[in-house]
Amino acid sequence: MTHPIHDLDDLVHQRSRLGILVMLSEGGRVQFSLLQDNLGLSEGNLSRHLTTLEAAGYVTIEKGYEGRRPRTWARLTNEGRQALNQEVTALKAIVAKAEARPGPATPKRRLSHGTAAT
Amino acid sequence: VSTSEFGSVDAADALTELDRLRRRTRRQRRGFWFPLILFGLLILASAPLYSVHETVSTTAENQADLTHYLRALGAMLKQDGDLRVRSTAPADAAVAACSIGPDPQVGDCGLTAAQTRQLRTLAPANPVFHPQTKQPSPARAALFWLVAGTAGYLLTAAFYRRRAIRRGVATSVRVYVTTGVGLLAAVAATTAASVFPLGNLVIRQMVPLVAIGIGLVILAYAERSFALAAVGTAFVAAILATSGINTTPTPLGPTYLALAFLTPYRLAFLGALLLAAGIAFAAAERVGHTAP
């Protein structure tokens, strides 16, 4: 039986991108500025993460206007939702496996805080 | 970014952080205090339309029978609401306002001595319990809800749209449109039907209220809110509880049960219920918004 760590998706498994997917899963669509505020990202970083997620087919980007103000909205696709669910399931499985096993926790490496889109 | 050697502590931290972010986004998106307050006020405004000031013809042949009749009626109406009693004597056009309570008296009904006499002269062959009610027309309440319910729903949609623009997060429009069209169709269909499949005119007046309750439960699902789901469920339960629906046969027949379904007082209670919940949610949102 493989360790649930192998179910983690490198593309999704990144702090900011995971955060983006979670926020989008909670709203029909979310504005760029709110993503930026809640995730504490610079405009450039957020743009790069969104481009990566869009290229993977996990989000769609809509550009438009509210009145005269230009707005950018992001929306989660079905594939994105599926990827997020899979990631959360894998994370829960890792925790559950560690809790079920006596002794020290597995060697740890922090969840990547990298800002560059890979 | 590698996932190798990702630790369980990290996984737990990540889940906690995601949960925090999820809750924060939900808080920013939610605004259900608005529909609760709005529909609470609409229900309060509709209360007078549910008046049970009814004209009932009775063939009670004497004062004792009439008292007995009123007592039974009062017990069914559970004390709220008034009733107008009219004798069926051909020459008697008098209508007396009558308070309905646990122990009603003919005197309480404001019957004059002449009216009481007239009641006593009714044909003894007629049964005491032979009420011929003139049901209240449900048209006013039905029309009110078709207009006010639709307007309330559109106002709620406008509120959410405006809020989505201001806050930057919107829920799925599809859920709102589907729910709105579905509920409006249900209310319109039951209103238009000359005979509602489940019963009578008064039930039709109840349908808009149940539709509001169902709308709240669907909103709770869309907003992922157990608290709102609890309010919606409690509201529907309160409608059913206060409407006094039961199938117990009574000597007065089902039409009197229908009369007892919804009264202004009960409507006021239902409206106050939503209003109180809306104010509580608005206060909670304000506290959450100003919290560090």
Image: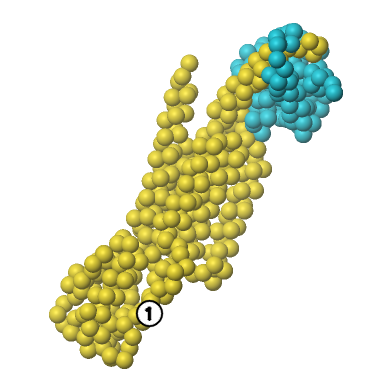
Chain colours: A cyan, B yellow
Badge 1 element = strand
Q: Residue most toward the right?
A: A1
Residue behind mark 1? B132
The percent position of residue B136, horizontal first and vertical second, equals 40, 69
The percent position of residue B204, horizontal first and vertical second, equals 50, 63
Q: Subunit of mark 1?
A: B
Q: Residue most toward the front?
A: A102
Q: In the image, B262: left or right of B7?
A: left
Q: Which corner quadrant of the image does residue B89 belong to?
A: bottom left
B177 vs B134, nearest the viewer:
B134
The percent position of residue B103, horizontal first and vertical second, equals 23, 67
Q: In the image, B146: left or right of B58?
A: right
Q: Is residue B170 above or below residue A39?
A: below
- Rendered residue at 70%/15% (across/down): A102
- Rendered residue at 63%/13% (across/down): A40
Q: Which corner quadrant of the image does residue A35 belong to?
A: top right
Q: In the image, A11: left or right of A25?
A: right
Q: Is residue B197 at all visible to an observer of this figure? A: yes
Q: Which corner quadrant of the image does residue A106 belong to?
A: top right
- Rendered residue at 44%/51% (across/down): B238
